[in-house]
Amino acid sequence: MKRGILAVFFVLMGLALAQTSVRVGVLLPISTVAGKAALNGIQLAADQVNASGKVKLELVVTDDGNAAAAAVPALTKLMTVDKVDIVIGGLSSGVTFALSGPVKQYGPLFLCIGAASSVVEQAFSGYDRFFHYHPWDYHNVAAAMEFFKYLYQQEGARKVAILYEDGPFGSAGIQTYQDQLKKAGFAVQAEPFKSGSGNFTATLTRFKSFKPDILYWIGYDVDALPIAAQTRQVGLEPKLIYGAPPAWPAGFEKNNLSNDIAGMTAWLPSVANNESRKFVSAYRKKYGEVTDEYMAPMGYTIVLSLGRALEAAGSADKDKIAEALAKVQMDTPFGPLSFKPSDTGKTKYQGFNQSIWLQFQYLEGSRRPVFPKEKASRPLRYPGNY
């Protein structure tokens, strides 16, 4: 009997010793809608990875405050005090750009969840421990332009007014957007704004004389309601309001001002693939609800891919993990994931591209896919009622 107990003990000890264990820093703006969704997805996937028994992930979660002034010392603490070798983060472009110097200084394996600006791509050029999962801004442009070409050819839209925030997120690709829209036949008028200012009336009033068919705004979730309200207040009457924030405000769909507003997302719970359905089921079981924020499955995907790389590497060495991660090919809620150099060649490991984007519209209190046709669950309402 004692020999049997000892045998089981030594087997369990052997499994424990064989298990690859790592500490992973998670650096996100967890007070924001997108940051909280991302963290939920990360924690869900970490539970699944740890349950396998082959890999153990210890998450060290830190709030970056959605500000460079908070993010840089937070990263420093993760590296020098918490002693992590892997960091998951980089949601906003401005914060991630500020982190590029410290990341290169401390040398972690940096798994970037957001940060679409090509300014960030340039900042991390040559850093071979940088894995960027989210599409870059030029991928966003390509996906959005397919929709705008449809609006031009099928709906008769001819004029676009662009309202964009003046930071890296909004301004990095703005010239490309204007050039592409003009090339497609649109007349374009574009003006910047300071994100979070909450006052857009002057700019929206100036747009009235332009009489745009489409009001296209590029900013953050805090800008959505003020823009929707003030568009109506000044009497601007576009046929479509199209927003491009990284996340929409919590409960925005319950506000009547959201009706008929369109936008772009990488994922919705209605996406019909097996990995998406599994994610939705697991998320509901853990959190008692279903999210429609795509940063949740993005965080989930990052951790599952990291788990696969750790298992393949059989080591906690960050360079061996990076080598294994570069070879990962897997199905995800967004579709297939594999890494290759970015389109510009500035970074070595780019995950998703424009193929994951879909266009949606707020209809009857929820986001419904409306474009492209193969992903649509409802027809686009154009012109919208604003």
Image (cartoon, rainbow, N blue to C red):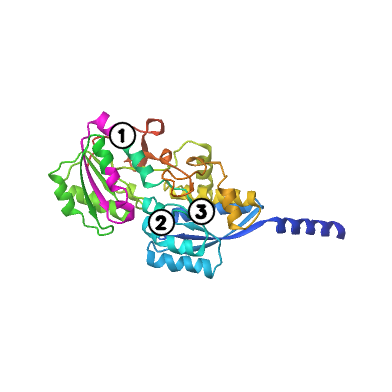
Q: Hey, which residue is sitting farthest left in the picture?
A: 209
For badge 2, the amino acid type reads Ala
- Type of residue at label 3? Asp
Left or right: 94 with respect to 50? Answer: left
Can you identify the residue that label 1 sits on? 380
Vertical relation: 353 (above or below) 17: above
Viewer-side residue, 157 vs 51 = 157
Determine which residue is flagged by label 2: 123
Quarter of the picture containing the N terminus is bottom right
User: Residue lying furthest bottom in this view?
Assistant: 81
- Of the numbered discs 2 and 3, the one sitting upstream in the chain is 2
Residue 159 is covered by the magenta coloring: yes
Q: Residue type at mark 1? A: Leu
Q: Front-most of 137 and 148?
A: 137
Disc 1 and disc 2: Cα gap in Å?
38 Å
Residue 104 visible here = yes
Hey, which quadrant is residue 383 in on the image? top left
Q: Which residue is nearer to you in this view: 51 or 299?
A: 299
The stretch drawn in magenta includes residue 44: no
Q: Residue at x 39, y 58 (%)?
A: 97
> 10 Å neighbourhood of mark 3: few (<14), some, or many (≥20)?
some
| Local crowd size for mark 2, using a 10 Å CA cut-off: few (<14), some (14–19), many (≥20) | some
From the image, state whether disc 1 or disc 2 is nearer to you. 2
Question: Badge 3 is on which residue?
Answer: 128
Q: Is residue 276 above or below residue 62?
A: above
